[in-house]
Amino acid sequence: MAVTAFNYGLFQKSMLEARINWVSDTIKAMPLASYTIGSTRDTAQYLSDVVTGGVAVEATGGGSTGYTPGGLTLTGKTLTYTAANSWTTQRANATAYAAGAVVRPATGNGFLYQATVAGTTGGAVPTYPTVVGQTVTDGGVVWACVGTGALVATGTIPPITTGNPGSFTASFLLFYKDTGTPSTSPLATCWDLGGAQPASNGGPWTPTPDAGQGILISFTN
């Protein structure tokens, strides 16, 4: 499944207020059947602002879904910071990239670039901008300069295994710290799964992050 991720604007506020510790806290992934994102990307800080606030609906499925409401608890969580010139994925000629892909130039210039438009790169190296926010068109891909390094939060999302009969479908995946109370459970990031993703009759529902980008990625400007 294609994943488009966005971090909540107030996630950093929660971090600086010591409301969330990615490694030691209980972080959950809640599948959503629907979500009208709107302004919540910039205004929502807690689970109650999104789910119990009525702009998102938690997925429930039918029959034996294999899902316990409240979300899937992540395991093996890590935080890793990587400077741009040490980033593993290098941009290559005539190569397809999905929107959201993050690369560095083959000859490092101290900056990372994220695809804002998916496509196939051209046959020659583009002239990379070195001002955060500026873009360059590279064949069918548009790269945006996003920063001098990236902090990647990882974790393992346990699969949902449907029963037989049973079905489960979700279109979004919301990541948050579970305090047991929605009004104090800070939001972190949300994945748009690119449409309804179904599983049924014993099949697994297993969302996976884009290669190298973990659950959440934050750039250094």
Image (cartoon, rainbow, N blue to C red):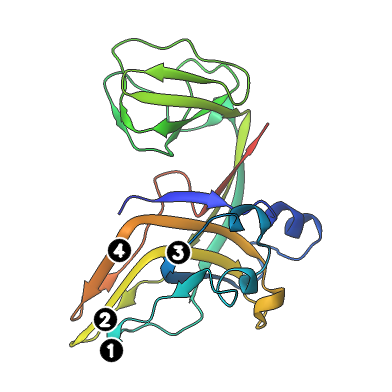
* Mark 4, secondary structure of its residue: strand
Disc 2 or disc 3, which is closer to the eye?
A: 3
Question: Closest to the observer: 168 or 37?
Answer: 37
- Indicate which disc, 4 or 1, sits on the residue closer to the N terminus: 1
Which residue is disc 2 drawn over?
162
- Mark 4 to mark 2: distance in Å? 16 Å
Height in image: 88 above or below 1? above
Disc 4 or disc 2, which is closer to the eye?
A: 4
Q: Is residue 156 left or right of residue 204?
A: right
Crowdedness near tag 3: few (<14), some (14–19) or many (≥20) residues, C-alpha within 10 Å: many
Q: Amino acid at mark 3?
A: Leu
Kindly identify which numbered label has been placed on residue 173.
3
- Indicate which disc, 2 or 3, sits on the residue closer to the N terminus: 2
Crowdedness near tag 1: few (<14), some (14–19) or many (≥20) residues, C-alpha within 10 Å: some
Residue 142, located in which quarter of the rendered image?
A: top left
- Mark 1 to mark 3: distance in Å? 20 Å
Which residue is disc 4 drawn over?
196
- Mark 2 to mark 3: distance in Å? 17 Å
- Indicate which disc, 2 or 1, sits on the residue closer to the N terminus: 1
Which residue is disc 1 drawn over?
64
* Mark 1, secondary structure of its residue: loop
Kindly identify which numbered label has been placed on residue 86.
none
Q: Amino acid at mark 1?
A: Ser
The answer to the question of whether label 2 and label 1 lie on touching residues, with beta carbons closer than 8 A, is yes
